[in-house]
Amino acid sequence: MHADSSQAGGPAQPQPSNAPLAPTSRRGAAVLLLAVFLGGSGTMVVELAAVRLLAPWFGSSNAVWTHAIGVILLALAVGYALGARWSLRAQPRRAMVTVLLGAALWCAALPSLTPIVADWFMPAGLTLHSAAGLLLWGSLASSLVLFTVPALLLGCVAPMAVEALAGQRCAETRFDAGQAGGYVLALSTGGSLVGTFATTYWLVPTLGLQWTFGLASSLLALAALLVAPGAWRVRAGAALALIAGASFWSGEPSRGLPSGWKRLAQEQSAYQWLQVLETGEGPERRRRLVANEALDSFQSLWRPEPGWLGQGSYYDAFAAPLFWDEPRPTWRLAVLGLGAGSAVRVLEGVLPQGTTLRSVGLEIDPEVVRLGELFFDLENNADDRIVGAGIDARAGLGALEGDFDQIIVDAYANNVEIPPHLCTVEFFREIHSRLRPGGWLSVNLSGFGLQDPVIRAVAASVGQAWQQPVLLWPLPFSRNTVVLARRELPIPDPRDPAFVVGPRELQTLLASARLRARLQAPGVDAELVLTDDHAPILALERRSVARGVAGWLQQEHEEAAR
């Protein structure tokens, strides 16, 4: 016999059609929160890996990071508002499934979409002069096209989940709005934390971008499957299989090669996208290690035999102190920003007779060191060639043993960005303390002439730190200027006949330098001196690029007028 409905408090109420899971089960709430956790993980994977997708075209500078993160934050904010509105619909659970599947599908397509979109704003074959403006605005436009939709959809998830969780009303699981919001925020943030560490330390360096976005897409589709109502689970499961297959079918994003070059290797490190390129045959072979957008820049160079690289290579200028100094049985060299070891190979191939080289190099990116060992003859042994992989230049400098005859600073976070802590007065004082009396500092800088704000600021900082004149040496056929300083002893004057020394190749290089190089006294450009407290090097680099673009446009105008 059925109980009298009047005695039971009225007729039994039907199960709400928008209940996310069985409302009488703690397991239902746990599964919903697991879906939120997976959604948070996928969101952070997309956010952190976004710049890595753009790096082959626009690099991974602070500006590119700012554009990508700014676009994603804006889209998330809009998504939160839309999600709050859509969560009030009759079937919030279905809406949640829809946005998760939509985000998953878009993420699966990102590795394939990126080359198409990025090529719109950064065509192949441009030089730094012609591409400077595109590096800034092209990365913003590409971010808007590529990342707005998935971030907006992912922003909808949290408010929908709060509404679904707060709708569970039973003795076993009662959530008010505050509890539901707190649990959703906690699990979403926990998932984001896992996604953050996994992306940086495992996914991108180990799996590459294609598999990273494939995994993120699959996590989002799995979250959709978990919260799907019974009638929708078959559809969500089919979508999960389709999205997972599409994720791993799409290719690794890549851009075209310069004419005449072939690709020997490409890798995603924890810091950057790397390629090893080769041209020529036999003794005429040349290799380049290029990072991110590269354009007409390179990180390291190689030819079959050690020694002079030519072709406007700034590495050749690092050999000059060997011949300006007194002959020494051992030349102790430290390279901060080793790359694949080009500076060491130049010096070991041109050593004066009776001199041996002992070198130690610090390189923050272990993948660069690995590629250097494979393709650039980079040696790492316990005797005369020591390589510190994964070590920051300034942090590692204090751990090096003994004094040095020469310290080379060639550290760039990207093709045109110097890490701020590696160009300050305090840093150059630390270098000064690690050189023997008469030892040399050689700093490679990228800029556009001796009036370039980056070159002026770094040279002023060296002069302030050492309280001695510095030599500014613009190199022919390149954008590079080498700044040299010498501890406690005078540095050669370009007007002095003794300035031109050494083998024929170096004499040619030094003879051309006499026309443009100059000694600069300490105290010049004192207002530009960089310190650990105030080092606006990124702003100076933007001014440098703007100056280079203006010069290029003026040259184009003059050529057109002729």
Image: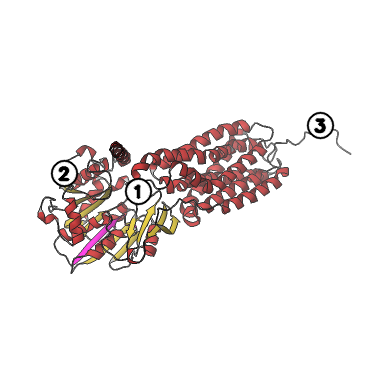
The front one of 18 and 419 is 419
Give the class, few, some or many, for how many residues have Cα within 10 Å of label 3's Cα (few <14, many ≥20). few
Q: Where's residue 390, x and y in %?
A: 37, 56
Mark closer to the observer (2, 1): 1
Q: Which residues are magenta?
A: 329-339
Mark 2 secondary-structure assignment: loop
Q: Which residue is mark 3?
A: 11
Give the class, few, some or many, for how many residues have Cα within 10 Å of label 1's Cα (few <14, many ≥20). many
Asked whether residue 155 appears in the rendered view, the answer is yes
Tell me the CA gap for discs 2 and 1.
28 Å
* Badge 1 amino acid: Asn
Q: Where's residue 43, x and y in %?
A: 53, 44
* Badge 3 amino acid: Pro
Q: Which residue is mark 1?
A: 415
Of all residues shown, which one is farthest toward the right? 1
The front one of 357 and 117 is 117
Q: Quadrant of the N terminus?
A: top right
Tell me the CA gap for discs 3 and 2.
92 Å
Label 2–label 1 contact, CB within 8 A: no
Sooner in the amino-acid sequence: mark 3 or mark 1: 3
Which label was assigned to residue 522?
2
* Badge 2 amino acid: Pro
